């Protein structure tokens, strides 16, 4: 599939396609994708929906996740991920970029860019990752007003309300906020930074009939729980927000250290996508085939001398 051919494009809006996934039995698994290439790789692995994390996105820009980027900057990432994969995408909307009118603008921009869903959190700026300390919470009535505004602005976009209240107000406080947000128009609830399976289960039991999203981030307050276990605990969606970015960043760090040490990247060949593998991932030949003036690319063979210091690979580069 390429996004240039209209017959290859999805016919239903992204929000409707996500709602159809949520209506099916089972948990919807949404790995984080911080750019179009990651989205294609996640799709190739068999995932049917994706997540755009504010933390992964800002880190890829060389910035901390403190709510300092703009709606249009996020829309750039939404467009490339939706265009590349065609999959329903849940986007991180932070605190909504302001009050009611700002939230409505965000919803329209995100939906027009191709997002299927957005989550909005009940923090005050400067916001923090949900697993960090001393987060400042918004008044629940003000957060409910944002959710109501988002629901008025969307066409098909799924509105997910995230509450960070568990750490400071306890489970009952988080549940009370969540119920208020559902009454204001939220389609689903994202209880952030719960710390035990028992806590996830207790929250779900207090929110019957409401689709719930679980965050399975590494290096946070939540212990490792599988998708199947989250489903059994009462959750309909699970995200792995920064996992792909963390792996990519670690690999890049090791590559640059190798280049600085050796002056050549051959020792890293075994960990690289080959040229052929990359071209297959991005559908290079499919794009070439659309224009008869482009001569079909022949992937060059790498000279044996270029393999010095690295593990041999049979495929082309």
Image (cartoon, rainbow, N blue to C red):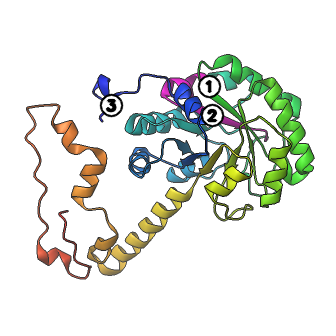
The residue that label 1 is drawn on is 107
Residue 125, quarter of the rendered image: top right
* Residue that appears at 17% across and 74% down: 306
Q: Residues within 10 Å of mark 2 (few under 14, many from 20)?
A: many
The alpha-carbon separation of the residues under discs 3 and 1 comes to: 23 Å
Q: Position of residue 201 (x, y in %)?
A: 80, 52
Query: Helix or strand or loop: what does disc 2 sit on?
Result: strand
Q: Position of residue 129 (x, y in %)?
A: 70, 52
Q: Classify the position of the N terminus by image quarter.
A: top left
* Residue that appears at 79% across and 29% down: 182
The residue that label 2 is drawn on is 118
Say whether marks 2 and 3 touch (CB < 8 Å): no
Q: Is residue 272 magenta?
A: no
Mark identifier at residue 3: 3
Is tag 3's residue or tag 1's residue first in the polypeptide sequence? 3
Say whether marks 2 and 1 touch (CB < 8 Å): yes
Q: Position of residue 294 (x, y in %)?
A: 10, 37
The alpha-carbon separation of the residues under discs 2 and 3 comes to: 23 Å
| Residue 199 in view of the camera | yes
Residue 263, quarter of the rendered image: bottom left
Q: Position of residue 170 (x, y in %)?
A: 91, 51
Q: Residues within 10 Å of mark 1 (few under 14, many from 20)?
A: many
Q: Which residues are magenta?
A: 107-123
Foreground tag (2 vs 1): 2
* Residue that appears at 26% across and 50% down: 280
């Amino acid at each position: 599939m390429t996004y240039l051919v209209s017959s290859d494009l999805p016919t239903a809006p992204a929000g409707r396609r996500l709602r159809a996934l949520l209506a099916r039995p089972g948990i919807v698994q949404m790995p984080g994708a911080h750019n179009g290439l990651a989205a294609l790789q996640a799709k190739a692995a068999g995932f049917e929906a994706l997540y755009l994390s504010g933390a992964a996105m800002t880190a890829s820009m060389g910035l901390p996740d403190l709510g300092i980027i703009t709606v249009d900057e996020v829309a750039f990432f939404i467009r490339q991920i939706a265009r590349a994969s065609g999959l329903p995408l849940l986007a991180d909307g932070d605190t909504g970029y302001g009050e009611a009118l700002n939230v409505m603008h965000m919803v329209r921009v995100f939906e027009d860019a191709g997002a299927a869903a957005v989550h909005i959190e009940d923090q005050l700026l400067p916001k923090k990752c949900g697993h960090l300390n001393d987060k400042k919470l918004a008044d629940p009535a003000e957060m409910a007003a944002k959710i109501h505004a988002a629901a008025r602005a969307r066409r098909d976009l799924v509105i997910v309300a995230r509450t960070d209240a568990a750490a400071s107000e306890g489970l009952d406080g988080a549940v009370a906020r969540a119920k208020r947000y559902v009454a204001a128009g939220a389609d689903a609830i994202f209880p952030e930074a719960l710390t035990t399976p028992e806590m996830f289960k207790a929250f779900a039991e207090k929110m019957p009939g409401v689709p719930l999203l679980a965050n399975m981030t590494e290096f946070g307050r939540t212990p490792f729980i599988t998708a199947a276990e989250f489903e059994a605990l009462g959750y309909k969606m699970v995200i792995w927000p920064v996992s792909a970015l963390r792996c990519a960043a670690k690999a890049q760090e090791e590559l640059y250290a190798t280049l600085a040490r050796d002056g050549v990247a051959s020792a890293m060949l075994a960990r690289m996508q080959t040229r052929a593998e990359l071209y297959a991932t991005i559908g290079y030949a499919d794009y070439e085939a659309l224009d008869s003036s482009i001569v079909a690319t022949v992937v060059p063979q790498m000279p044996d001398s270029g393999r010095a210091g690295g593990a041999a690979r049979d495929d082309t580069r």
